[in-house]
């Protein structure tokens, strides 16, 4: 009987954790910064320096760690790099913008659970060629505005500042992105699982279409 109460207590504790709030602050400007708080307690801060390991590693161990890091990076960015090589930067932006729009369209219920303290996006599109700048600007607007509209029209947003412009006097893209969002952990977990399966479904359909 005691074991049963312990098991029930653990289950109740886990359920309570799942319904506690989590907040994410993200900032991309001069550097990349992410802060995650769980029930008001900071559990992750990307700006904090990582502690150096005191243990000495052998040269072979160092090589193995480097290879693991490269593999991890490949998993995250390999798809984008391949698409960029295949269709160029504009094509890659259009492709992933379409994926994001489809996935978010399936997760409208999740967007309604989000509470944004603010969303700020200032994006200046530029390149070395004026014609390329115009094409890139049009593609980015086509990709981003439907996604931003889905988010801002369904989520609770206290403050938003969204500006996307083309600058023909510069040669590099300038991005200033910042947002702070709150939600319950259980919604985040369910959305991640659902979003992953929707992404896999989209990729499989794309592969079938390419084979035809």
Image (spheres, rainbow, N blue to C red):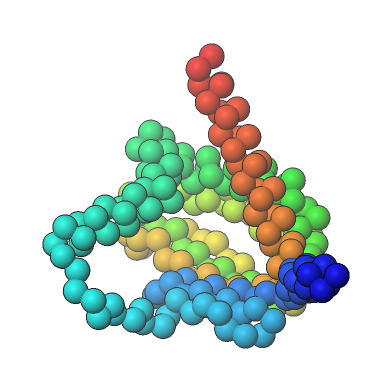
- The residue located at (46%, 48%) in the rendering is 136
- The residue located at (49%, 51%) in the rendering is 137
- Residue sitting at the far right: 1
- Residue sitting at the far left: 59
Question: Residue 56 location, x and y as percent?
Answer: 19, 74
Determine whether 15 is above or below 78 in the image: below
Question: Residue 69 location, x and y as percent?
Answer: 32, 57
Horizontal arrangement in the rendering, residue 47 relative to residue 141 (left or right): left
Indicate the quadrant containing the N terminus: top left, top right, bottom left or bottom right. Answer: bottom right
How many badges with numbers are in the image?
0
Decide which of 55, 108 is in the foreground and name it. Answer: 55
Decide which of 21, 56 is in the foreground and name it. Answer: 56
Decide which of 192, 111 is in the foreground and name it. Answer: 192
- Residue sitting at the far top: 212
Question: Residue 17 location, x and y as percent?
Answer: 73, 73
- The residue located at (76%, 58%) in the rendering is 110
Decide which of 176, 211 is in the foreground and name it. Answer: 211
- The residue located at (29%, 79%) in the rendering is 52
Horizontal arrangement in the rendering, residue 48 relative to residue 42 (left or right): left
Residue 149 visible here: no
Q: Give residue 182's quadrant in the image.
A: bottom right
Residue 55 visible here: yes
Horizontal arrangement in the rendering, residue 41 relative to residue 185 (left or right): left
Question: Residue 10 location, x and y as percent?
Answer: 75, 71
Determine whether 1 is above or below 40 in the image: above
- Residue sitting at the far bottom: 41
Q: Give residue 161's quadrant in the image.
A: bottom right
């Amino acid at each position: 009987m005691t074991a049963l109460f312990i098991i029930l207590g653990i289950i109740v504790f886990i359920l309570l954790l799942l319904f506690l709030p989590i907040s994410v602050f993200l900032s991309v400007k001069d550097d990349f910064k992410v802060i995650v708080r769980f029930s008001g307690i900071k559990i992750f801060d990307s700006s904090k320096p990582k502690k150096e390991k005191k243990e000495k590693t052998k040269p072979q161990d160092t090589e193995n760690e480097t290879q693991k890091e490269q593999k991890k990076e490949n998993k995250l960015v390999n798809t984008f790099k391949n698409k960029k090589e295949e269709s160029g930067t504009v094509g890659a932006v259009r492709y992933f913008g379409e994926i994001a729009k489809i996935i978010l369209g399936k997760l409208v219920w999740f967007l309604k659970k989000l509470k944004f303290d603010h969303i700020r996006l200032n994006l200046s599109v530029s390149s070395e060629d004026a014609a390329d700048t115009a094409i890139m600007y049009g593609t980015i607007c086509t990709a981003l505005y439907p996604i931003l509209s889905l988010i801002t029209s369904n989520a609770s947003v206290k403050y938003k500042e969204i500006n996307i412009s083309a600058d023909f006097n510069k040669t590099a893209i300038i991005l200033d992105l910042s947002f702070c969002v709150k939600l319950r952990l259980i919604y985040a977990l369910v959305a991640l699982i659902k979003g992953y399966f929707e992404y896999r479904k989209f990729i499989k359909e794309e592969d079938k279409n390419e084979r035809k």
